[in-house]
Amino acid sequence: MRHVIRRIGIYLLAIWAALTINFFLPRLAPGNPAEIVYQRLSQHGAVSPATLKALEIEFGVNTTDPLWVQYIAYLNNLLHGNLGISTNYFPNTVTQIIGQDIKWTLVLLTVSVVLSFTLGTLIGIVVAWRRGTALDTVLSSVMTFFYSILYPWLALMAVYFLGYTLGWFPFADGYDVTLTPGWNLDFLLSAAYHAILPALTLIISTVAGWMLTMRNSMITTLSEDYVLLAQAKGLRSRRVMFAYAARNAILPSVTGFAIALGTVVGGALLVEIVFSYPGIGYALFQAIQSQDYSLADGILLLIIVATVLMNLVVDMLYTALDPRVRQERSA
Amino acid sequence: MRQTSPSNEIASVPGGANRPALPPLGRTYASPSPFAGLMRFLRAFWRAVTVNRKVMLGSAIVGVFVLVAIFGPIIIRQNPLAYTTDLVRPPSAAHWLGTNQGGQDVFVQLVVGTRSSLSWALLSGLMVMMISIAVGLVSGYAGGVVDDILSVITNVFLVVPAFPLAIVAVEYFSRSTLTIAIIVALTNWPWGARVLRAQTLSMRSREFVTAARAAGEHTWRIIFLEILPNEIAIVAASFITTTIQVLLAVAALEFLGFGDSAAISWGTMLYDAYFGSALFQGAWWWFAPPGFCIALLGAGLALLNFGIDEVADPRLRQGKRRRQRGRATVAA
């Protein structure tokens, strides 16, 4: 219990740190968003200085309020779910835009992470069980190459070969844009069809990590005495493989899962950008390109909070899987 | 290399020449040539590099890239940004990897870009390691309140997703490779710090540390001159892991266009290719090579790391060593 409370404390602190970084980042950097937007506006025609003042108020910069008052106002806004107004999609609020885009990212990310974790772990188990064979040598070498592949590059290759040259899959947007989004079969099928290539690239680039982690930890448990005993008892090898060796080897993979989450989120972001997928990653990129600061900050905050919450879930899962953690004092 | 070959034969005798500190035979005594030290170093280096198949392959890959990074731009002597009239041509004898939209030679850019990509990856990796070492060792050795505070900071940074944070942070500051390197370093250090902290915790109660403390050594001396050298294997391993991550992170940020647009690196080549719509001109030779080089260099580094792991943990080694050794020499 003490362990759980300690972890929750760290996660709360992480969220607070993220909020604070998000607050100070625009204020530390040279220039401010209001001026940038003002300059952009003035390129299209004369703009009165009052506009600059209005923009400054909207972004909450360059005010006479002391920093701590601004900070408290910022936290108060966040508590009420008020992330500001997007300059790009004026007058939509950041919350509205995120609410629209998040569904795409959630579905894509959940499906590919679950598939790649299951697939990678299973391959890792089998490969460790048959270590030293041709299968192990080939798969391990291929996976080592995939392990250090650059997401956007893999996505580009997939777009070029499977999408552009062979024409098997669509490679831009999240659905056939001639259809109207809604809960009908045509739209859902089109959305699933468009998701294949992004999901595939995400799976290929993350599966190697799970496999290599599982292989290494499985090989360590395979040399334990209880595995030998299980085999000596004459248990079927599938039972020894999954219920004895793999069951005890899965723990490092679960920890790895928590740590890899941040990387997977980053990868999903890049994949969305390459495929112009209508999720929050693509929205973040567009927001940054068009200097829509409130939208970019809002999305960043959401990503951080979501990752932290996912970490908490994995932590709870870990505690459930490993009785030793429940008894230990420190993390 | 020719000079070292006779001594390599001595070194390869089982059990022989395992102590490089002792001069091997009378010949070296008689004339202590300046090459003796170099040869000893080369022999030790060769032994380290050929310790097993994975390390051998890994160091061969990384070695080639290092050589290209150092000598490539000297040998090629072509301006990678020079425009020609051969626009978007496929690979040919004149342009080994074809040309891009501006008629620039892709192969020349790839070779010149190796230096930038490799050196920024190593530099950021080094920055990450310095932070990791400082936080990990101090936190592990000091214990108490210092450890609590540093551990909480480490754990907080560990759960915050580095890449989205880096994207937004880069945007607020000036666009240059240095900015990218600094931000990547600031968002990637906690993993190494955690590993080093755990190791330092177990080192703290060893006898040599107690002895150093009893001898009245200064705390900083104990941490960085007594404990650190004993963790050099872990530092090396996490430096390699970090370098892979950093190589990918820098390339990804450059791909998104946050890099220095005047500089040539693998990441900026991918940016040019993607936003110059290489895809729809069918110019695979423009975007395939830089990404392949990144993956290959990363795989080389990963192999080095797995090889080191196998040396440290014999259980990870595969069976039937003898047969594989035979095959490895063929592959090399």
Image (spheres, coloured by chain):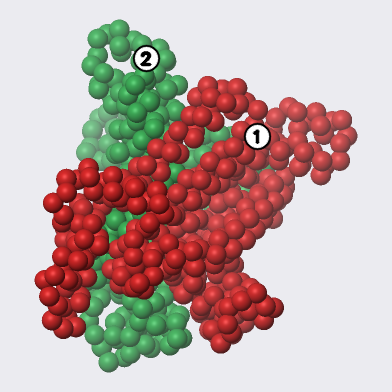
Q: Residue furthest top?
A: B214
Percent x, y of residue B103: 30, 86
| Location of residue A193 with respect to B141 vertically, above or below | below
Q: Nearer the viewer, residue B157 or B220?
A: B157
Circle 1 packing at 10 Å, graded few (<14), some (14-19), many (20+), is: few
Mark 2 on the same chain as mark 1: no
Which of the chains bears the disc numbered 1?
A: A
Q: CA distance from mark 2 to mark 1?
A: 39 Å
**Residue B84 to residue A113: above or below:** below
Question: For numbered disc 2, what is the local secondary structure?
Answer: helix
Q: Which chain is green?
A: B
Badge 1 element: helix
Residue extending furthest toward the right: A234
Location of residue A253 (image quadrant): top right
According to the picture, the residue beneath numbered tag 1 turns out to be A320
Q: Which residue is mark 2?
A: B208
Q: Residue B135 shows which numbered tag?
A: none
Q: Which chain is red?
A: A
Q: Relative to B216, say whether B226 is above or below.
A: below
Please state which amino acid type lies under the numbered disc 1.
Answer: Ala
Give amino acid for label 2. Phe
Dot 2 crowding, Cα within 10 Å, few <14, some 14–19, many 20+ = some
Question: Is residue B4 shown left or right of residue A264?
Answer: left
* Residue A176 position in % (x across, y down): 57, 83
**Viewer-proximal residue, A34 or A271?**
A34
| Residue drawn at x 49%, y 35% as measured from the top left | A8
Which of A225/A58 is in front? A58
| Residue at 24% in and 9% down | B216
Whether residue A156 sits left or right of residue A78 in the image: it is: right
Q: Position of residue A35 (x, y in %)?
A: 17, 66
